[in-house]
Amino acid sequence: MAETTEPGGPTGSTGPEEPTLDEQIAAYQREFRDLDPQVEKVVSALGRLNRRMNVAYGRQVAALGISNAEWEVLKTLVLAGLPHLPEGPR
């Protein structure tokens, strides 16, 4: 499950390079001896995936010309059913 992040890589960032998961876990283990490295590796990988998904999600809604909050409202209205739709043919 080793991971590298390069400038312009999966996150699209050109900022400081993020340590690999193995480097990150090794640093944690130096400070927290009781840390379960397998659990922490999964948790850290999920955190990274979440950040990347949020960036991609933000780009998608921006391309639609709406905010994340507006998208959430639209999704809620769709799931609520027909009362939010105007009368007439679809």
Image (cartoon, rainbow, N blue to C red):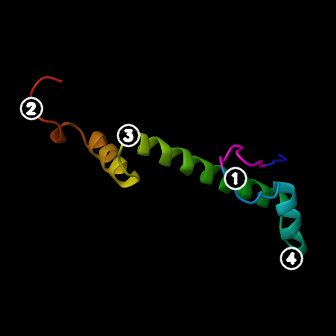
Question: Mark 1 touching mark 2, by CB under 8 A?
Answer: no
The disc at residue 14 is: 1
Residue at mark 2 to residue at mark 4: CA–CA distance? 62 Å
Query: For the residues marked 1 and 2, what is the alpha-carbon distance in whole angstroms?
Result: 49 Å
Residue located beneath label 4 in the image: 31
Q: Magenta segment: does it hold 6?
A: yes
Q: Magenta residues? A: 5-12
Residue 76's x, y, as percent?
31, 47
Residue 87's label in the rendered image is 2
- Along the polypeptide, which appears first: circle 4 or circle 3? 4
Nearer to us of marks 2 and 3 is 3
* Three-letter residue code for mark 1: Thr
Image depth: mark 1 or mark 2 in front:
1
Image-quadrant location for residue 47: bottom right
Q: Which residue is mark 3?
A: 64
| Quadrant of the image occupied by residue 21 | bottom right
Q: Secondary structure at mark 2?
A: loop
Task: Kindly identify the residue that appears in the image at 73 percent across and 58 percent down.
Answer: 44
Q: Residue at x 82, y 54 (%)?
A: 20
Q: Is tag 4's residue or tag 1's residue first in the polypeptide sequence?
A: 1
Q: Magenta stretch: residue 60 in it?
A: no
The answer to whether residue 62 is above or below residue 38 is above
